[in-house]
Structure formats: C-alpha cells, structure tokens
Image (tube, helix red, strand yellow):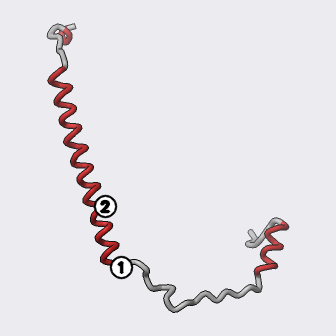
Amino acid sequence: MAIGAREFIDKLLVEKYAQEKVDNHQEDALVSKVDADDMMYAMNTACQTYKTMLALNSRLTGVCYGIVSKTAKYNEYASCR
C-alpha cells in the first residue's frame, strides 16, 4: 500500500506545497495566554455548579416520587386477581 496522493488535484497540491517553508517559531508561541489560577477557578466553579444541579435533580426526583405515591389510589382487590 503506497502512501501519497492518489487523485490528480491532490498530486498538484503536493507538488505546489512540497517546497514551502514555514517559519512560525515565535518566542511567546508556547506561553499560555490564560492564567492557570483563573482556569482552575473557572473549572472549579463549573464543577460545583454541576454538582449542585445533580443534587437538586436527585432531590426533585425524590419529591416527585413521594407526591406520586401519596396521590396514587390503590385498589385492594387488584392484587388478588
């Protein structure tokens, strides 16, 4: 199995850009633009929000189950059939 361009347009593109040289090595290219403490704070805030939502969802589910069970009307003869 050969590696390379198979279609005509791909071969033309490979020939066109084969000798191109790119010089994008800047001094600050690898320096983060975002402060690590700010990123950790944002991640922690998002995590706490998600945990709170899960806890509220769980509590709401329990309350809904309770309301349904209290308002259900059970027929005492239904289980005997």
Residue 34 lies left or right of residue 79; in this view the side is right
Q: Position of residue 49 (x, y in %)?
A: 27, 56
Element type at mark 1 = loop
Q: Is residue 71 above or below residue 27?
A: above
Residue drawn 58% across and 89% down?
25
Element type at mark 2 = helix
State how many labels appear.
2
Q: Position of residue 41 (x, y in %)?
A: 29, 70
The residue furthest bottom is 27
Q: Is residue 60 above or below residue 73?
A: below
Identified by mark 2, the residue type is: Ala
Q: Position of residue 73 (x, y in %)?
A: 18, 15
Q: Which residue is mark 2?
A: 46
Number of residues whose C-alpha sits closer than 10 Å to that of mark 2, classed few (under 14), some (14–19) or many (20 or more): few
Camera-side residue: 7 or 2?
7
For the residues bearing labels 2 and 1, Cβ distance under 8 angstroms: no
For the residues labelled 2 and 1, the Cα–Cα distance comes to 17 Å
Which of the numbered marks, if any, corresponds to residue 64? none
Camera-side residue: 20 or 7?
20
Residue drawn 55% across and 90% down?
26
Q: Earlier in the sequence, mark 2 or mark 1?
A: 1
Identified by mark 1, the residue type is: Asp
Which of the numbered marks, if any, corresponds to residue 35? 1
Number of residues whose C-alpha sits closer than 10 Å to that of mark 1, classed few (under 14), some (14–19) or many (20 or more): few
Q: Quadrant of residue 34?
A: bottom left
Q: Is residue 64 above or below residue 50?
A: above
Residue drawn 30% across and 77% down?
37
